[in-house]
Image (spheres, rainbow, N blue to C red):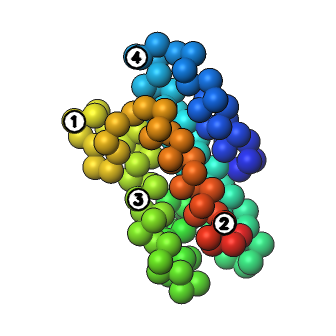
Amino acid sequence: MSKEFLKIAEDILKDIDNYTRKRKEFYVRTGISRAYYGLIWHLRDRLSKQGYNFKNKNMHSHIPKILADMGRFDLIKRFEILKAKRNDADYNLKSDFKELKTLDKKTLRVYIKDVHLFISTLGV
């Protein structure tokens, strides 16, 4: 399932120039959200195989706890930034952004790249 979320984000990025300015914003927002969910579902699947329990847990807050348990403090802040950007994309108006600066093709491309980098850095 996680690969499908990330694939949708990558498909949106590939097609983003086909949309008008207003629709482009919504597709960028959707792409960021799909990439984030690709990340957390990937982490849940892989970390579950390592014995971590996600039953009745909020993945958004449980993953940083697992990263701390693994001693991967270097990744906690990166995860929180990815989560905050997804929150900006899903819930905030541009004037309320905490992490995102713009909603354009470059923003989506960098976000997807950061998700892939996070996955490869963790090695799961």
Which amino acid type is shown beneath numbered disc 4?
A: Lys
Q: Position of residue 77 (x, y in %)?
A: 41, 69
> Which of the two labelled residues, at mark 4 and mark 3, occupies the earlier sequence position?
4
Which amino acid type is shown beneath numbered disc 3?
A: Ile
**Residue 117: quadrant of the picture:** bottom right
Q: CA distance from mark 3 to mark 2?
A: 17 Å
Q: Residue at 42% across / 62% down in the picture?
A: 80
Please tell me whether mark 2 sits on a helix, a strand or a loop.
Answer: helix
Which amino acid type is shown beneath numbered disc 2?
A: Ser
> Which of the two labelled residues, at mark 3 and mark 2, occupies the earlier sequence position?
3
Q: Residue at 54% across / 77% down in the picture?
A: 67
Bin the neighbour count of mark 3 within 10 Å (Cα to Cα): few under 14, some 14-19, many 20 and up.
some
Would you name the residue on which mark 4 appears?
Answer: 22
Q: Which mark is residue 81?
A: 3
Please tell me whether mark 1 sits on a helix, a strand or a loop.
Answer: helix
Bin the neighbour count of mark 4 within 10 Å (Cα to Cα): few under 14, some 14-19, many 20 and up.
few
> Cβ–Cβ below 8 Å for labels 2 and 1?
no
> Which of the two labelled residues, at mark 4 and mark 2, occupies the earlier sequence position?
4
